[in-house]
Image (spheres, rainbow, N blue to C red):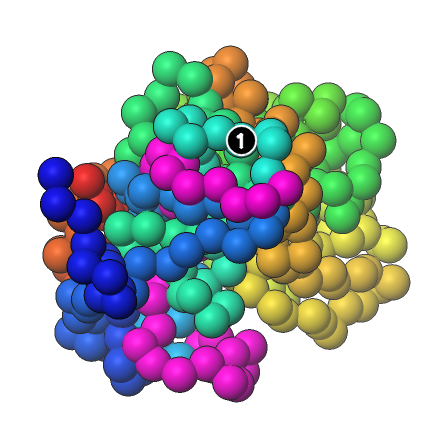
Amino acid sequence: MVGPLRGVVPLMRAIGVHRFGGPEELRLLDLPEPQVGPGEVRIRVHAAAVNPTDVLLRTGGHAVRMPNASPPHVPGMDAAGVIDQVGPGVDRLVVGQPVVALVLFTGPRGGAYADHVVIPEASVVPAPEGVDLHAASTLLMNALTARVALDELNLPRGATVAVTGAAGAVGGYAVELAKADGLLVVADAAERDAELVRSFGADHVVPRGAGVAEHVRALLPDGVPGLVDGSAQTAELLPALADGGTLIELRGWDGPGERDIQVRPVMVPDRMTDTKTLTELSQAASEGHLTLRVAEVLPAERAAEAHRLLEAGALRGRLVLDFT
């Protein structure tokens, strides 16, 4: 087999944008293959999940976090694949190992929509056993978001937590993790999703929509001590909280609170190198305690279509781009 010519930089396929805008701005790119440095691994990506934060990158919503980055910008925070390079100092992971990883797409190397990604070892863990890599790619970002939200609430066993957007990816994981933490869960759902949300372990299911807070209060007149806002309803949900309760926001809203209610935004990048928690989430998926849901798998070249489908809403599970 003839190797690459000396001085010729190998190229890889990636999907990204040269300018912020609609799904049509996503382009097939040829970019230099990244090479590992100390403490890093390279993954041959098989699958990249499509998340709402990818849409924010495409539209310019993350530009403030990447003031020195030059285009093209490559989305994608969730990758699953097989390690094909390890850097000096890496001893926990090996070449040929199936893994899942969180990718900081606001960094200089871009995100997971690529044939290869190079990531700090701490953000990479073994893939869930018995799960194909398409499904595995849907795990970490959303499950870690739910885990961080519940950790921030820090409710004692037996306490009640409310979860909105419970049929969605983050909401579903929040319900399952809350039950594993010994909490009583009140979750919302459309009528067609009520049984799905109950299957995650929700103790009570209330109708989704503008009346969620009222429905929660009908069940629990004093309100709930904690609420994870997976539906981005923000201020509409404050009446569901007990005096002194905490609302966890996933999209940056930080108030105003009232009745001594705390509003706490949580950010996944703060925990991207929490290897212990990432490993626990992968193990929970291996054991069937977290439900991995794939809405559809599309070839990487159809990333624009995936973004259109995501923005149209009504998905149950994550869209996945195939890079094999």
Q: Nearer the viewer, residue 208 or 308?
A: 308
Picture coordinates of residue 235 (x, y %)? Answer: 63, 67
Q: Which residues are magenta?
A: 61-89
Q: Position of residue 213 (x, y in %)?
A: 61, 52
Q: Identify the residue shown where x is 81% and y is 40%.
A: 154
For the question of whether residue 80 can be seen, the reply is: no
From the image, which quarter does the C terminus lie in? Answer: top left
Foreground pick, 312 / 135: 135
Q: Is residue 315 above or below residue 73?
A: above
Confirm whether residue 42 shows in the render: yes
Q: Residues within 10 Å of mark 1 (few under 14, many from 20)?
A: some
Q: Nearer the viewer, residue 177 or 132?
A: 132
Q: Residue at x 61, y 58 (%)?
A: 269
Position in image of residue 185 (x %, y %): 64, 31
State left or right for residue 194 relative to residue 226.
Answer: left
Is 84 within the magenta?
yes
How many numbered marks, from 0 up? 1
Check if residue 112 falls in the magenta segment: no
- Give the residue at x 55% y 77%: 65
Q: Looking at numbered disc 1 in the image, what kind of residue is underneath it?
A: Leu
Q: Nearer the viewer, residue 298 or 232?
A: 298
* Residue 106: image location, x then y, percent: 49, 69
The quarter in which the N terminus is drawn is: top left
Left or right, 11 with respect to 243, comes to left
